[in-house]
Amino acid sequence: MDFDYTPEEQAFREEVRTFLKDNLPPKEARDPGFLKTWLERVREKGWVGFSWPKEFGGGSGGLIEQAILREEMALAKAPPLGTSFMGLAWVGPGIMQYGTQEQKQRFIPDILDSKVTWCTGYSEPNHGSDLAAIQCKAVRDGDHYVVNGQKIWTTGAPFSQWIILLVRTDFDVEVKHQGITCLLVPMDAPGLEVRPIENMAGDRHFAEVFFTDVKVPVENRLGDEGDGWKVTVSALANERSSIGEVTQMFAKLDTLKGLVRNSKKQGRPASEDPKVRRQIAQFEAKIAAMKYNGLRYLTKQIKGEPLSSETSVNKLHRASLEIEMDDFAVELGGTAGVALAGSEEAVDEGSWAKSSLSWPNVVIGGGTPNIQRNIIAERILGQPKD
Ligand SMILES: Cc1cc2nc3c(=O)[nH]c(=O)nc-3n(C[C@H](O)[C@H](O)[C@H](O)COP(=O)(O)OP(=O)(O)OC[C@H]3O[C@@H](n4cnc5c(N)ncnc54)[C@H](O)[C@@H]3O)c2cc1C
């Protein structure tokens, strides 16, 4: 096994580091126009849609370089490379794979140029884990569909311009994965109503989305009618990367070590406390295990084998590790550890307290731990379904 990077890959890492040194001022020195300039610069570098083909405006970059780029960006705690996380992660890849020529021209450039933000309308009040059971209905009426129903937990709905929506176009099917269709819907369509939901941390990022006789032109259908399940599953698999889960954890551990260095335990530096040291070492070991697991899957991808179920392993690890790290940081801060931003006492601007209240983001968002365990048991370990 060879963990060394090639000279070209190392040169690319240096290029990213130099770019960050030149273009990422410390937080306190950033002016109001910083984000716009940042997004333009990373776009000029071809780093937005890094692995997307050049013909669509992407960077045509390799998977190892993409992992290096993500790692360096995370360690530098840089802003994202685009304003639409979901646009870059699965909507864009889905459109490149299944979209019509007209859809590619219409949607891809705006995602790369951070001109639009996309949200994802999959979950419904009674159908989260069991996604294929969706009931939100679309009926074809000439050159458009009429959509009625409800979605929930739609992250980014209050500030997105478009939603990638799964609807049922056929109820008379043998298996529930059939009869599902994927539509691309503007959030300002008449009859579409967004009702934000406040989470425990006081944020209003996600929402309920209601559809009452919303007309969606047939030209906004992604893939064929009834092919929505295939479109969704393969679009998601496209951009899956087990290593992606880890890069954020490096950055989090780095911040946690900073907190330890600046904290005291029973009047002494926390960094001298054996329990604290052991705990940090455990986090480091777990993250290293995730990293090598991610590299194993990355090797698979480089060999041309698509990823699917394997990404559940790191997703499951990350969920529990994030909670453990947040709890540890909050406890280390004592009473100040639970103070949120705005309080004079707040530790690290209240970010640990906030993140410990936001655990559903990483634990439930994208599929619960039980569902990941089912996937690992059935599809990786070959255990029986019942
Ligand atoms: C922060 C956040 C952001 C989200 N963003 C989005 C978004 O942008 N778009 C979107 O469409 N959805 C989004 N979701 C919804 C998310 O995908 C669902 O909440 C999730 O899939 C679980 O579905 P559910 O809430 O209906 O729970 P349920 O499916 O009802 O699950 C309830 C419990 O039962 C367990 N369970 C269910 N089925 C099984 C089974 N077969 N075997 C074992 N245990 C099982 C689950 O693990 C869980 O513990 C978001 C959720 C959160 C918390």
Image (cartoon, rainbow, N blue to C red):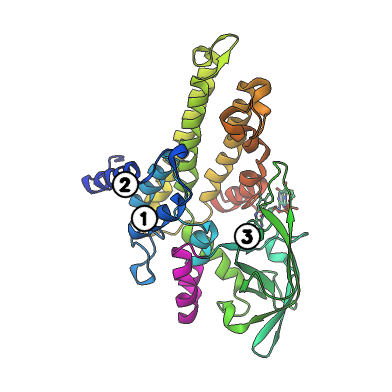
Whole-number angstrom distance, CA of label 3 to CA of label 2: 30 Å
Whole-number angstrom distance, CA of label 1 to CA of label 2: 9 Å
Circle 2: element type? helix
| Residue that numbered label 1 is attached to | 41
Q: Earlier in the sequence, mark 3 or mark 1?
A: 1
Residue 135 percent across, percent down from the top left: 75, 69
Q: Nearer the viewer, residue 26 or 246?
A: 26
State yes or no: residue 386 in magenta. Answer: no
| Residue that numbered label 2 is attached to | 19
Residue 309 percent across, percent down from the top left: 54, 53
Question: Which region shows up in magenta?
Answer: 93-115
Q: Is residue 173 above or below residue 207?
A: below
Circle 1: element type? helix
Q: Are marks 3 and 1 in contact (CB under 8 Å)?
A: no
Residue 159 percent across, percent down from the top left: 62, 60
Tell me which amino acid carries mark 2.
Phe
